[in-house]
Image (cartoon, rainbow, N blue to C red):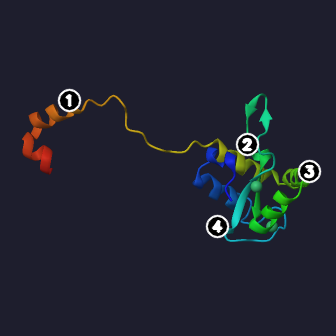
Amino acid sequence: MPEQGQAGISAVQVKRIKLAVGCICERCRRMFRLPLLEIHYIREHCRLGGRRTENVEENLIVLCSACHQKVHATSHAERELAALRSARPASVRGAIRTILSQQSRTIHPPADIDLAEVFREALEVGGIDLFLNGA
Ligand SMILES: [Zn+2]
Ligand SMILES: [Zn+2]
């Protein structure tokens, strides 16, 4: 079950976070295949310094689906999960922070390309056949 805030992190980041914790559920400590692990937000809409910060290392925990269901069914899970999260080794913590700090690498073409200009240049260089059919 994807979490609401998860829109803020890419599928690649989710995968890398699961790898960073060692492909385990951080609650029951068992190993799982990556698709069976889920990211849970310890606090659904937490704020730090007035900014919404669901997607920070301190707020994310990797769970298997059984544990995930359990924590959603429990009202006092937040404290337990926060304790588990704070027991993370510094190396794992650092790795997750690095992953979260990396922006997704979607490539947008520059918006200022003038297609008429491109077409004119193509005509001057190779003529319409080259433009339409390639070299
Ligand atoms: Zn588990
Ligand atoms: Zn959850």
Cβ–Cβ below 8 Å for labels 1 and 4?
no
Q: CA distance from mark 4 to mark 2?
A: 21 Å
Query: Circle 1 — which element?
Result: helix
| Marker disc for residue 79 | 3
Q: Quadrant of residue 30?
A: bottom right
In this picture, is 33 found above or below 88? below
Mark 1 vs mark 4, CA separation in Å: 47 Å
Query: Could you say whether the residue bearing mark 4 is in a helix, strand or loop?
Result: helix
Q: Earlier in the sequence, mark 4 or mark 2?
A: 4
The numbered disc on residue 54 is 2
Q: Marks 1 and 2, Cα distance to the nearest angstrom?
A: 45 Å
Give the mark, 2 or 3, whose residue is nearer the N terminus. Answer: 2
- The residue that disc 1 covers is 117
**Disc 1 or disc 2, which is closer to the eye?**
2
Tell which circle, 4 or 3, labels the residue nearer the N-terminal end: 4
Q: Position of residue 60 (x, y in %)?
A: 76, 50
Q: Amino acid at mark 2?
A: Glu
Dividing the image into four quarters, tell me where ligand 2 lies: bottom right
Q: In the rendered image, which residue does mark 4 sit on?
A: 35
Q: Which label lies toward us, 1 or 3?
A: 3
Query: Which kind of residue does numbered mark 3 sit on?
Result: Arg
- Amino acid type of the residue that numbered disc 4 sits on in the rendered structure: Pro
Q: Quadrant of the N terminus?
A: bottom right
Q: CA distance from mark 4 to mark 3?
A: 26 Å
**Label 3 crowding class (10 Å Cα cut-off): few <14, some 14-19, many 20+?**
few
